[in-house]
Amino acid sequence: QVRLMESGGGSVQAGESLRLVCAASGYDGYMSYMAWFRQAPGKEREAVAIIKSQVHITYYAASVKGRFTISLDNAERTLYLQMDTLALEDTAVYYCAAAESLAIRVFHPAEYVHWGQGTQVTVSS
């Protein structure tokens, strides 16, 4: 059974940094894509950053590009999201997700079959 467990969320002030960690387990080989999504109150879940697992090609939402960095340690099956220069609008629950298929729309949450329970990130002024 695939399990994704996020950690590293918390409360910070605008301009500060956080690093989220997602520990994956329960499968052999690779997930095709791993990703970070977020969902703010009253808003739809949105993709933040995606990484194609075997080749480490990355994709970012326009709102975080240049501030956030996704990385993956395949040997440790650990996904990271380094978040720098955090802004108030980054406040949300952040979710780790994994897809098994290569032929997916990488920014669409419905394409991901495995999800973590989420970790809260709160940015204040």
Image (tube, helix red, strand yellow):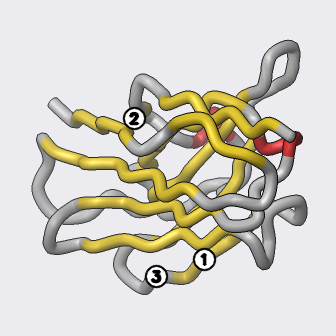
| Residue nearest the viewer, comparing 60 with 6 | 6
Residue 88: image location, x then y, percent:
86, 41
Give the residue type that dot 1 points to. Thr
Dot 1 and dot 3 residues touching (CB under 8 Å): yes
Q: Earlier in the sequence, mark 2 or mark 3?
A: 3
Q: Which residue is mark 3?
A: 56
Residue 41 falls left or right of residue 25: right
Q: Earlier in the sequence, mark 2 or mark 1?
A: 1
Instruction: Report the residue that reaches farthest toward the top.
Output: 42
Q: Identify the residue at horizontal 68%, vertical 67% (top origin).
A: 84
Q: Residues within 10 Å of mark 1 (few under 14, many from 20)?
A: some
- Numbered label tally: 3
Give the residue type that dot 3 points to. His
Residue 121: image location, x then y, percent:
62, 36
From mark 2 to mark 3, how far is it between C-alphas? 19 Å
Q: Identify the residue at horizontal 72%, vertical 29% (top origin).
A: 39
Residue 53 falls left or right of residue 11: left
Q: Which residue is mark 1?
A: 58
Q: Identify the residue at horizontal 46%, vertical 82% (top origin).
A: 56
Dot 2 and dot 1 residues touching (CB under 8 Å): no
Residue 69: image location, x then y, percent:
60, 72
Give the residue type that dot 2 points to. His
Dot 2 and dot 3 residues touching (CB under 8 Å): no
From mark 1 to mark 3, how far is it between C-alphas? 6 Å
| Residue nearest the viewer, comparing 31 with 120 | 120
Relative height, residue 19 to residue 9 (above, below): below
Q: Identify the residue at horizontal 49%, vertical 31% (top origin).
A: 119
Q: Which residue is mark 2?
A: 114
